[in-house]
Image (tube, coloured by chain):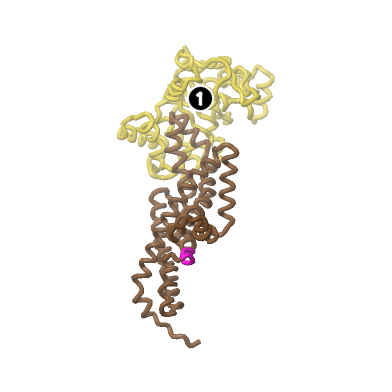
Amino acid sequence: MPHLEVSDVRARYGSLEVLSGVSFTVDRGEVVALVGPSGSGKSTVLRLLVGLLPPSGGTVRVAGEPVDYRRAAMVRAVRDRMAIVFQQYNLFQNMDVLKNVTLAPVRIKGRDRREVEDLARRLLDRVGLGDKLHAYPDELSGGQQQRVAIARALAMQPEILLLDEVTSALDPELVNEVLEVIRDLAREGMTMILVSHEMAFVREIADRVVMMDKGSVVEEGPPAEILDNPRTARARDFFGKILRH
Amino acid sequence: MNYTFQFGVVWRDFPYLLDGALLTFQIGLLAFWGGALIGLVLAAFKTFGPRPVRWLVDAYVVFLTNTPALIQIYFLYYGLAEFRIRWSGEFCLLLGLTLNAGAYLTMIMRAGFLSVRRTEMEAGEVMGMSRLQQVRYVVAPHIAKTIYPALANFFIVILVMGTSVGAIIGVNELTGQAITRASFNYRWLEYFTVVAGMYVVLTFIASIGLALFGRWAFRVKARVF
């Protein structure tokens, strides 16, 4: 049984249908990459999964259980299992790094402060920011902020980590330090859904690639297959434009 | 010019001037807090309220920021007296300054309300925060930090410029006290020299206090002067 099952999910912004029947699955420990042109609905899928945008149709199942996004308790339960990292980091500007990471587990989840702080220190060490515990977001580079955001998401101890174009806002020389962290997580078996334009990275890290266009899935498969031998004309066209080789 | 400065009388009157400075500080502080409360409520109305309420807030702000505080206080002191409402000069000064400050602070607070970053609230939301928790942990501290410098500046404006209007309706705050004392011996120049210095000291103390508080509470890197 897949850990996450998205079937025929639809969503709309007002009268505009942004997702028109999206289906894919994610197994435990799997890294699935969502790729596709801008506006194809990749980020929308992630926002929908964490309950920032209500679906207008279809089903999302987590560990076999259908999720009713109209029920607040269910949305809370889903947010317990999934954490999202945004393109723009969205750190709390008025708190230092340690507080950013520990706030929700301590204040919202009611976990023991000392335990959470230990965890936070370990996570921040791991993303290479063990010496920045008391720095504020505006004192950090984009890459450092994004690594804090990843540590913050991990401190929620999610079963699935959603990464929404986490390197798109970064200067080129800062991209690698963030990718390195994600690579590490994949190696440890973290279940992840990754929206990315870094095709070389997707090829290296993803177990499966799901290509979307205009709010639906065009094609999916292992990276080697889908990136190098796409079956559909749309995918051939897309990868032909972005892969320079 | 053969004017001989004689500060002796001023020093003898210094306790009076200190009393005046204290009253200045008290009225300034009270008017500021009252105004901040009005500002907070009206800014919330202006941001979230229905259209007629927003218009009323606009009318209040436009009317009170575009007329001199002196005129507003005259209305309370002399105008209302025609209707047999006779309040003391101190009360009229305090009320007038509070209403006036309320209008300016509405504008300042409104800027704070508009500066809230939706994305940070979203980050809080997906980590399981309720709307109220988002306000408490994300929105409120951010607003406070954003508007703090403007608030601190405005406090100084009220403290120095606002309160001194009281002299005209006979309130013995610092300026009023100086006028009262000087009218006994006509040493205007000496009194006002000393009083000017006292205003600077008062402002200096307030500025340092505000800067330290801002740095401690909101990480605002404010310069004192």
**Where is residue B147 drawn, in percent x and y?**
49, 49
Residue A161 is covered by the magenta coloring: no
Q: Name the residue under label 1.
A: A51
> Mainly helix, strand or loop, the magenta region?
helix
Q: How many marks?
A: 1
Check disc 1 and give the amino acid type: Gly
Residue nearest the observer in this picture, B165 or A7:
B165
Dot 1, crowdedness within 10 Å: few (<14), some or many (≥20)?
A: many
For chain A, the rendered hue is yellow
Q: Residue at x 38, y 70 (%)?
A: B17
Please tell me whether mark 1 sits on a helix, a strand or a loop.
loop
Q: Which residue is drawn at 47% across and 51% down?
A: B35
**Where is residue A138 drawn, in percent x and y?**
47, 45
Evaluate whether residue A204 shows in this view.
no
**Where is residue B138 drawn, in percent x and y?**
45, 39
- Residue A37 figure quarter: top right
The residues colored magenta run B164-169
**Where is residue A38 drawn, in percent x and y?**
63, 29
Evaluate whether residue A168 shows in this view.
yes
Chain letter, disc 1 residue: A
Q: In this view, does A121 lie above or below B24?
A: above
Q: In this view, does A45 lie above or below B185?
A: above
Residue nearest the observer in this picture, B106 or A134:
B106
Residue nearest the observer in this picture, B134 or B56:
B56
- Residue, far bottom: B2
Residue nearest the observer in this picture, A52 or A203:
A52
Q: Residue at x 42, y 83 (%)?
A: B5
For chain B, the rendered hue is brown
In the picture, measured across the screen, residue A171 lies left or right of residue B32, that is: right
